[in-house]
Amino acid sequence: MSYVLGTYARSVKDNFISGKGSYLYNDKNEKYLDFVQGIAVNALGHNHQALVKAMKSNSEKPWHLSNLFLIQEQEKFAERICKLTGFDAVGFQNSGAEATELAIKAAVKYFYSIGQKEKNRILCIKNSFHGRTIGTISAGNNPKHTEGFPLLNNFDHFEFGNHDEMNEKITDKTCAILCESILGESGIKVIPNHCLQGLRKLCDEKNILLICDEIQSGYFRSGKFFAYQYSNIKPDIVPFAKAVAGGYPVGGCLFTKKIANSMGIGSHGSTFAGSPLAMSLANVVLDIMTKKGFEEHLNEVSKYFLLKLNEVQKDFPELILEVRGRGLMIGIKMHDDPSKFISLLLKNKLIVVKASENVIRLFPSLIVSKEEIDEGIKIINKTCNEYK
């Protein structure tokens, strides 16, 4: 019997006691190749020595200070990420759901601050995923997540790719369009570049804010720091989280100046967000990701991985419909429910995770080697042969 709230279908029940890079080890000393990495959280793999060193060096300093105090590591990180991405301010949170909640609040508050109180509705993609709070499940509008819960009534929705329905749902009360640049939970569906460009133009024409959710796709997971950058656009608001501190809970939301100016003292806050310990780790992650060669290695390895996966798809077309995604945010779309296939992959010591639309998500660390990719491909090939 477990006293933990039973809200997770735990597909992996091993007791993992150690990890190194792309690998996890259980209490039987069995070695697993981890292509989940905490669902895109452990971007630098397990037990990265720079993060371990930072954790140890900060363990004897104040872990937590109230945000009523000036936190130097927070100031340092804020300046770095704003200059890196071209935004004017960042608000800190502890998770992706909280970051999206802040994005929602800020979008509505901006129009309130300029005297347009009636502009308070947000348009979202139906069955998208933005978190598990009441606000974020209301935005996602996925029946699997909303059943039995009261929903906020200031969200409108359209089907992915249905531009006519999207335009029909825009009214004078629409204050923002919220979308994932790459829909993760919904099946690794990439919003095409021209569609994001069209969204930006539409928002400008209709005085609507564009919010790009980069919680899962951000921090080079897609091959660029943020996935929307493939489209050469700039959103007004960008929530981010997951990989920020290499496994330590950190989230945030980036704002252009006019949005940031509408969020005055008392309009938002957090007890734990932006702590000295969290920000120290977040700065180390930025140190590593902005080093020369990091992005180049990632894109070289991701192209190799996609090439090899497409070869597997050609060999097993009766099992695999397509391979989709960008960078190391990859989905294998199966013809049928992939649960049994995932269990067989686990038996063969490869850890993956399921998404909607019969998709298997593959999220290796961003510093994964070609040799580790080859090992994963070998296991996937083996599993396809056994599954037949």
Image: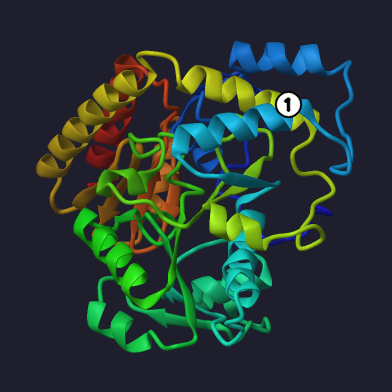
Q: Mark 1 — residue?
A: 73
Residue 330 at least partly seen: yes
**Which quadrant of the view contains residue 313?**
top left
Q: Is residue 128 above or below residue 181?
A: below
Residue 16 at least partly seen: no
Q: Within 10 Å of the Cα at label 1, are there few (<14), some (14-19), or many (20+) other Cα atoms?
A: some
Tell me the element at label 1.
helix
- 315 vs 257, left or right, is left
Residue at 86% across / 28% down in the picture?
Answer: 63
**Which quadrant of the view contains residue 177?**
bottom left
- 185 vs 130, left or right, is left
Q: Is residue 294 above or below residue 9?
A: above
Q: Is residue 236 above or below residue 64?
A: below
- 178 vs 165, left or right, is right
- 183 vs 370, left or right, is right
Front in this rendered view, residue 258 or 74: 258
Residue at 16% across / 39% down in the picture?
Answer: 310
Residue at 55% across / 52% down in the picture?
Answer: 257
Residue 196 position, x and y percent, is 29, 59
Q: How is the image coloured?
A: rainbow
Residue 311 position, x and y percent, is 13, 35
Q: Amino acid at mark 1?
A: Glu
Front in this rendered view, residue 111 or 48: 111
Q: Is residue 156 above or below residue 25?
A: below
- Taking the view exactly as shown, the residue that stands out farthest to the front is 114
